[in-house]
Amino acid sequence: MRKNKIKEMMLNNKPVLNGWLQIPSTVSAEMMSHENWDSLTIDMQHGLIDYNNALPMMQTISSTNVVPLVRVNWNEPGQIMKILDAGCYGIICPMINNRKEAEKFVQACMYPPDGFRSFGPMRGFLYGGSDYPKYANEEVLKFAMIETKEALDKLDEIMTTPGLSGVYIGPADLSIALGEEPGFDKSENTKAYSEICRILDYSKKNNIFSAIHNGTAEYALKMIEKGFNLVTVGSDHRSVITGAKEIVDKIKGSLKRSDNKAY
Amino acid sequence: MRKNKIKEMMLNNKPVLNGWLQIPSTVSAEMMSHENWDSLTIDMQHGLIDYNNALPMMQTISSTNVVPLVRVNWNEPGQIMKILDAGCYGIICPMINNRKEAEKFVQACMYPPDGFRSFGPMRGFLYGGSDYPKYANEEVLKFAMIETKEALDKLDEIMTTPGLSGVYIGPADLSIALGEEPGFDKSENTKAYSEICRILDYSKKNNIFSAIHNGTAEYALKMIEKGFNLVTVGSDHRSVITGAKEIVDKIKGSLKRSDNKAY
Amino acid sequence: MRKNKIKEMMLNNKPVLNGWLQIPSTVSAEMMSHENWDSLTIDMQHGLIDYNNALPMMQTISSTNVVPLVRVNWNEPGQIMKILDAGCYGIICPMINNRKEAEKFVQACMYPPDGFRSFGPMRGFLYGGSDYPKYANEEVLKFAMIETKEALDKLDEIMTTPGLSGVYIGPADLSIALGEEPGFDKSENTKAYSEICRILDYSKKNNIFSAIHNGTAEYALKMIEKGFNLVTVGSDHRSVITGAKEIVDKIKGSLKRSDNKAY
Amino acid sequence: MRKNKIKEMMLNNKPVLNGWLQIPSTVSAEMMSHENWDSLTIDMQHGLIDYNNALPMMQTISSTNVVPLVRVNWNEPGQIMKILDAGCYGIICPMINNRKEAEKFVQACMYPPDGFRSFGPMRGFLYGGSDYPKYANEEVLKFAMIETKEALDKLDEIMTTPGLSGVYIGPADLSIALGEEPGFDKSENTKAYSEICRILDYSKKNNIFSAIHNGTAEYALKMIEKGFNLVTVGSDHRSVITGAKEIVDKIKGSLKRSDNKAY
Amino acid sequence: MRKNKIKEMMLNNKPVLNGWLQIPSTVSAEMMSHENWDSLTIDMQHGLIDYNNALPMMQTISSTNVVPLVRVNWNEPGQIMKILDAGCYGIICPMINNRKEAEKFVQACMYPPDGFRSFGPMRGFLYGGSDYPKYANEEVLKFAMIETKEALDKLDEIMTTPGLSGVYIGPADLSIALGEEPGFDKSENTKAYSEICRILDYSKKNNIFSAIHNGTAEYALKMIEKGFNLVTVGSDHRSVITGAKEIVDKIKGSLKRSDNKAY
Amino acid sequence: MRKNKIKEMMLNNKPVLNGWLQIPSTVSAEMMSHENWDSLTIDMQHGLIDYNNALPMMQTISSTNVVPLVRVNWNEPGQIMKILDAGCYGIICPMINNRKEAEKFVQACMYPPDGFRSFGPMRGFLYGGSDYPKYANEEVLKFAMIETKEALDKLDEIMTTPGLSGVYIGPADLSIALGEEPGFDKSENTKAYSEICRILDYSKKNNIFSAIHNGTAEYALKMIEKGFNLVTVGSDHRSVITGAKEIVDKIKGSLKRSDNKAY
């Protein structure tokens, strides 16, 4: 089976740079896949992407060596198994609150006896190879998102779930859970920041991977330095907005100034 | 009929800032439509967009006051009429070489007796209003692209075509036609630059609008200063690549430097 | 945040006229959105519409001031949150049986601490505005469908669910639950009619909105008079059938009569 | 090969009732196909429908005995042949001006030696049967639209084109060609009406079928009486608008009246 | 209501030959539907097919008398009801472990008082007829997949679930559950084979239908002989691979041999 | 620029095995791309595939080293240029009759000064590399189909067209042009066979590549032996039908025999 490149990187203490896809198009996905990310996550939760788009996006990404991940929109076995069959090499599952939910998630990703995934990895064979069934339980990454009040009280019971690869922090939901404003790149004086540090510590203690979503490259670098194994920065959708704003502001701003000068 | 905002701007000597859509998705189109462009062009020629995507993209753009334009992939009446029926307020037609082609293009955009457009403006009614048939010939912009050797020899015969609104310059094809490297934002010592200036002069002389495609806001501002009525800068697709490159370079670059330091 | 127009209408005792979309097309959706409905509901339960269609339909409707609602196909948080992120301003949830289900539904629609909705309102920002997160819990309508035997026994416990905006009656399922034939516009001697009246009374008592699905404008007017805050009449799909039947019957009927005369 | 039911009807002097599809959806197409039309035309010209929608719409219609026709958007062999391969049993081609164009159209519909259609009728085999190649030239209907000034001067040369099945009148374009307002169901004092009558006469003289687009069943019946072989009435898109208007007007009208009474 | 042809066949002890669809296309679905299968199952679990494809595939299949079935990807009422509304005549539900799950599944397929299916069978009416509501509970087949360890211990409690039509065996998952290699057409010395026989016996004892997935026609015939009521063989996706392999092997093999001979 | 693998093979006298795609799905395309074809042609003429499907199919194929070709549906520059921009490495153009048509085709595939292709190779850059513009004229294969009477009379004038890579024979159309039954794998006593041999001879004489469509691997091997550079065998669509027929015949045949035995 094709090795999970980013799993190996993390095992070797190499930080993983993950890109984020929220536009439902193979065109933006393909362009992103040529930009030297280590992995790309198709966001089926807040991204405007459903299975019908995620499938060809995953097929398209497969033309490069970027590892395809998916964030599902809920801890539902049917959805998780279907996107795994479509060849994704890691699942990020939102809103894991406790051990029971963590087990339900992780076991949906693994064939018996480790879990209850149903057999039929159509694209798993194509992308992973004919021995996919043998190694998939191990190679597929399973990240639980820690972002609710309940989860914060149950870090150990979640993180010791057999088969769980790591935790993924969504700072926006985490902030809301703590009564703070949603947002990325939390400053050090926030409760969210403290909790991010605590989650990181627990992940180290429990010997699982840690990942975090960031707004800027600068903050992501800081998080890598702190010890996070995987960082996500920006998204295709964010780039479209930022790129447009920059051009429009420059031109409209300049035109306004000339207008003002004129009178 | 809803007025063509950018036509009025150009008539009032206000420069028009046009955005460019090449990703076949209503999601990127909608985000772009919220970024204060005066108009957005759906590029059905080099963009990876077909009618089936262009239609809902146009419907989506209609939620803002950004004017929807389309670049068709060829001077074909069936294609032009169909996209006009879908509610677009201006056509940019590539590779117009001479008067005959210019007439074929312009007349495909107008109902008799001015042209031979067939009647049935389904979304024209919805977007433009119930009196669309009465004013459409006038309100719909018709831009001929000047980008071939033959066209450079026939500027006057093309520009005097009755009903033609203006010319649109694609610097890449123009450069190739002149034996130079394709690219935007041509420097002043190129043949392409000279021809761009000449086309601009002819458009002024013939009292039609002039438009040009640019790579950067800076160059576009320069073109506005020179007298162009409409400037296009960048594209959704370009923003995705640029945004990704910036993040990836920053992070991978920084990691590389730390790696080097480490040993 | 853009105000929820129909919420304001209902608060001001103005009856809301809601249209119903069951054809998976932006074309029919756009036509409907130009016809002066106060709101339009995309029916993802019995309508033949999935997320991939609902998204561009919602984008298209946004070009008018018609309020976009969605009926989900089941009380599933992942589905509900995803369609809310896509910018819908109200959810109608089928088959709510009791308080626990009502709470699960309502809380999926609200950010903490009121609920457990996950943060990332992509189109919420575009359609609602940048302060969407602050007001969304309040502005988004949450209608529970009352249509099962169990629910009829638990009207108060359902209707007092914190955050629930109102109840929506589907007369067909209600009829079946009561052992009667499915159908709209129930006559006064049916059990379904009695229950509809009782649900209405309970909604008034509990100070929440009431809504009902109708087959004809006449019946809907009667329901408005009885005190319902929102009425749905017909659907795009129903209009296509009715319109076709009328033409076909008229012509085939007339041809048959001539044929008979002929011999 | 499956017989072309409406061709047989017309040969037996039975009027054909044709429905019209402009919404790009298999859902509306299927509903229409159950409503007892003799044939249904997928309008790829002014309808908002492209090949990607037309194909499954045609597949869906095939579940009934309604004959599938297509109006192409232009007299282009590639487009015509492709939609014929998709199993349509008749083409309506817009804007035929003269003999040359008529021949180009008709021959694109027929295999050599009668025409230059290329061989590969994928759905032709499925829908028509394995002997499709043998009979297709004959069974497939070819209707030329007569709607331009030039065509009105060349009725005979067009109508005598070998292989042409009939003419189809689009009253809107015809009206514009004559300097009148576009519209259906022309009154008897219009030039368009006179020309409609003249075209009908010429079709009888030249022994080919005649067809006309109508706004109402009443007018269509009148046209049948005048001798037209095929009449089209309304469209799926028209029904959606009409159905919505009727409901909205009734309810909003009634509410307005109560409002007025109230004060 | 249109009779469920394969239900009648099974009642009359006629073996049913079921085809399997895993390619999300109306084109492959239509070709399959013309090949004399008794039924075709759209595999929404391991097949790469979502609702948006399954709907037009089902509409397309309806042009033949092949019975449309669906395998859902999980025991979710929303998903099951939606695909039933789309006109499917039987559901195969994966991973049924016990009585409670079996009841949840079966009742999602039936209107009250037998179950809790919600009313609104849009394509049910078109495909089944106007009396669909009256007979649907009975005509729609409900197959529970027996493929987990837990299920093997609870055959009787599952098989006696009121309304359950039969059991469907997926040999791959069954094998994994038993600690054997996944695969079809199990040889007689495997545990899976013994369990297949035992499940078959229990189905006979409990007087419900039995069905099994096979890799080859030969094995399927053997299963028919053993008493299975319905056999599935291969899939569209399998045929594409097999067909390609055969051609490529023959040609590349032959070329290699010539190459070898040459030197 | 990524080399055109099959061009190099042909230059080195290695026969090319080409597969054929007629199902509009990335799923069947991806499966085919893993089966060791040298190239795969997306058939946009008789295949049921439009641009909207061809684009993601091409993206999907790019995950392997199979060379992507396209057969366009007509000699239209807009269509040809658009599909080249989407990254295809060769065009097969149907129905080339003479030198003028051949030049129009070939020049649409090449940038000036060799042709009149417009610049903007979006996926050309991604698939081919950043120096795509420099080498594309040369690397992209241009095959003219020889299949009409007129073409048979003008072999030399067509084959000497500057830039033309080769000729592609469609035996079905060729047969019809010669008054014979359409079909592949023509026997030696047919006129079509003689013409195939003559076309082959002319291609050798004119030093261009020759290609032919075949029904079976056996015939294709014979054609390779005769000297053809590229052979196409079968198609995804053909495999689906053949695979189904084989299973159905075996099972229904066997059941029939048992039935007969039984009585």
Image (spheres, coloured by chain):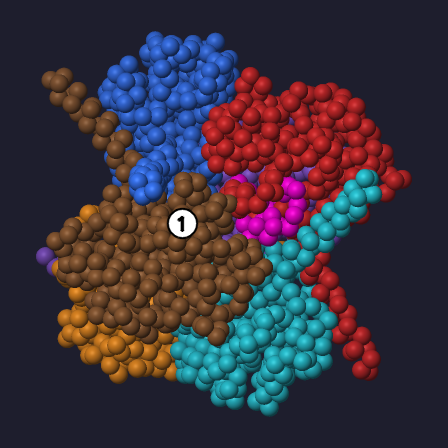
Chain colours: A blue, B brown, C red, D cyan, E purple, F orange
x 13%, y 18%: residue = B261
Q: Give the residue number, with chain letter if any, for mark 1.
A: B39
- Classify E211 as above or below B228: above
Q: At 81% from the left edge and 39% from the top edge, which residue is drawn?
A: D263
Q: Position of residue D178 (x, y in %)?
A: 55, 78
- Relative depth, front residue between A57 and E173: A57
As for residue B253 lying within the magenta part, the answer is no
Q: Residue furthest bottom?
A: D205
Residue at point 11%, 17% (across, down): B263
Find residue F260 and report its image quarter.
Answer: bottom right
Position in image of residue E115 (x %, y %): 71, 34
Q: Is residue D237 visible?
A: yes
Residue C122 vertical placement versus A52 (above, below):
above
Residue type pointed to by label 1: Ser
In the picture shown, does residue D218 fall above or below A5?
Answer: below
Which residue is located at x 41 percent, y 16 percent? Answer: A162
Q: Which stretch appears magenta?
A: C25-51
**Which subunit holds the residue at mark 1?**
B
Can the viewer see residue E115?
no
Count of number-bearing discs: 1
Percent coordinates x, y for residue D150 in the rendering: 48, 82
